[in-house]
Every structure is written in structure tokens, then in C-alpha cells.
Image (cartoon, rainbow, N blue to C red):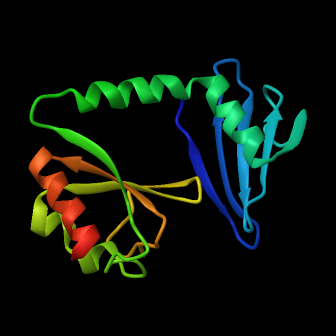
Amino acid sequence: MSEIAETQLPGVGVRYDFTTEDGRRVGVIHRHGGRREMFVCPAGDPDTTALTMELTDDDAHTLVEVLGVSRVIEALHQLQQMEGLALDWLRVSDGSPYAGRTIGDARIRTRTGASVVAAIRGGAPHPAPGPEFRLEAGDTVVVVGTAGGIEAVRSIIASG
């Protein structure tokens, strides 16, 4: 699998790109404010774009599905079936004592042994959020640990 380069673009956003086996550079620019632009550069000339197009949220989701997100879901399903290891998606409710507070404030890993491996906010993933990541009502956190650890996280998020 190709390595994905992440480049901060000051005042613009973040560019993610990789080089295909035939030498083309393919990437997406995530602009501040949510716009996404996809680009393709011809082989041997990474500074010239052969194709540039803006992607709406629906376009991006459709492209991900076409490119094989189902393989990722299948891999997650297999992970869920491993003995002694559990994975779950937990929603942060409006009434959660941790809505508006950080993952570190909840001390999830210390209290349960489970880890928050991603957060999803408004359909946008936030992989590997650190303890400074502020949870908001409506977020979904992806948690990995033992079944008991995940149940403890569910309780913490719901009632503290």
C-alpha cells in the first residue's frame, strides 16, 4: 500500500496525497470550512495537475464507497469477532457529563483499560484523538477494549 503524505497548507487546510504505482500523484485538499478538492498529476510531473475537481460531501462518500470502504467495514467486523477484544461505536448524548469536555477529563483509558481510537463528528472522522480532544454532544466515539471495558466507557459517557 502506498504511503499517504499529509501536508499542512497554511491558510488553506491540509493536503493528503500519494503516488500510484504508475507514478501519478493523487490527492485531496481538505480546505478550512469543509470544501474538498481532488487532484491527479501526470506521471513524472508532480507539480502539474491533469485533473482537479471539487467534491461535495455526497461525492466524497460515494467515491469512498466505490473505492472499497466495504473492505474496511469487513476488516472491522473481523476485528469485532476476535476473542477477548471488542470494538463499539458509542454516541455522546446531549445529557452526557462529558459533552463539551475532553477525553482526558473522562480518564477513559485509566478507568477502563479501553481506548478511544476515533471520533466521528458530523460525518467527519477524527482518527486517534488525543486526550485534549473535546467531545461534543452528537459525537460518536469508536472504542476498543474488552467487552467489560467498553461497557464501562458507555457508563462513563452516559453518567460520569
Front-most of residues 141 and 20: 141
User: At 83% from the left edge and 43% from the top edge, which residue is drawn?
Assistant: 47
Extreme residue toward the front, this view: 95
User: At 71% from the left edge and 71% from the top edge, which residue is drawn?
Assistant: 10
Q: Against 43, is 120 above or below?
A: below
Task: Specify the quadrant of the image occupied by residue 28.
Answer: top right
Give coordinates of residue 98: x percent, y percent.
33, 78
Front-most of residues 128 and 96: 96
User: At 37% from the left edge and 81% from the top edge, which residue is drawn?
Assistant: 101
Q: Against 53, is 103 above or below?
A: below
Front-most of residues 28 and 23: 28
Q: Is residue 138 left or right of residue 88?
A: right
Give coordinates of residue 6: x percent, y percent.
59, 52
Give coordinates of residue 131: x percent, y percent.
31, 72
Give coordinates of residue 67: x percent, y percent.
63, 24
Q: Can residue 146 be seen in this view?
A: no
